[in-house]
Image (cartoon, grey):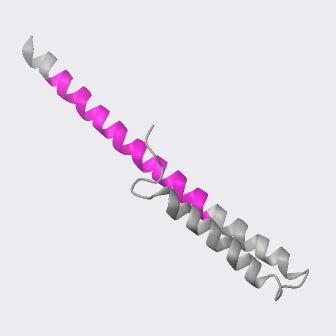
Amino acid sequence: MKRLFTGSRPWSLLAGAAGAVLVLIGTRARLGPDDWAGLGQWVGGLGAFYAAWAALRIARDEVGRESRREAERQRVHAYFVSGS
């Protein structure tokens, strides 16, 4: 199965997660109880964008795979018809 994060390293994902945790710890003193709900909505929105990106990438890969299959079918069909 093809990796979703081609070209990226696992340490970069870990560094991003660690950075997010550090930002949350750093802003903890500044945020009141009502502000945490807004922060959760922002994080959920970013998750939605990531999910949409992943879905579009999977769809693009599937379209490319299907076009290669169709080209192979056409090539084999042309050979079969002309070879008779």
Toward the viewer: 71 or 65? 65
Toward the viewer: 73 or 22? 22
Q: Find residue 41 and report its horizontal and vertical position in percent.
A: 76, 71
Relative to 64, is 54 above or below? below
Task: Answer left or right for 77 relative to 8.
Answer: left
Q: Find residue 13 and report its horizontal and vertical position in percent.
A: 55, 61
Instruction: Indicate whether residue 62 is drawn in magenta.
Output: yes
Toward the viewer: 29 or 82? 29
Task: Answer left or right for 50 relative to 26.
Answer: left
Instruction: Indicate whether residue 51 is drawn in magenta.
Output: yes
Q: Find residue 9 and report its horizontal and vertical position in percent.
A: 45, 58
Magenta-drawn stretch, dominant element (helix, strand or loop): helix
| Residue at 80%, 77% in the rendered image | 38
| Residue at 66%, 72% in the rendered image | 20
Q: Residue furthest left?
A: 83
Relative to 40, is 5 above or below? above
Relative to 36, is 71 above or below? above
| Residue at 51%, 60% in the rendered image | 11
Quadrant containing the N terminus is top left
Quarter where residue 69 is shown: top left
Task: Answer left or right for 47 relative to 53.
Answer: right
Quarter where residue 14 is shown: bottom right
Which span is picked out in magenta? 49-78
Quarter where residue 77 is shown: top left
Q: Find residue 55 and report its horizontal and vertical position in percent.
A: 54, 52
| Residue at 24%, 34% in the rendered image | 71
Toward the viewer: 83 or 28? 28
Task: Answer left or right for 43 relative to 16.
Answer: right
Q: Residue furthest bottom?
A: 30
Total numbered circles? 0
Q: Residue furthest top?
A: 84
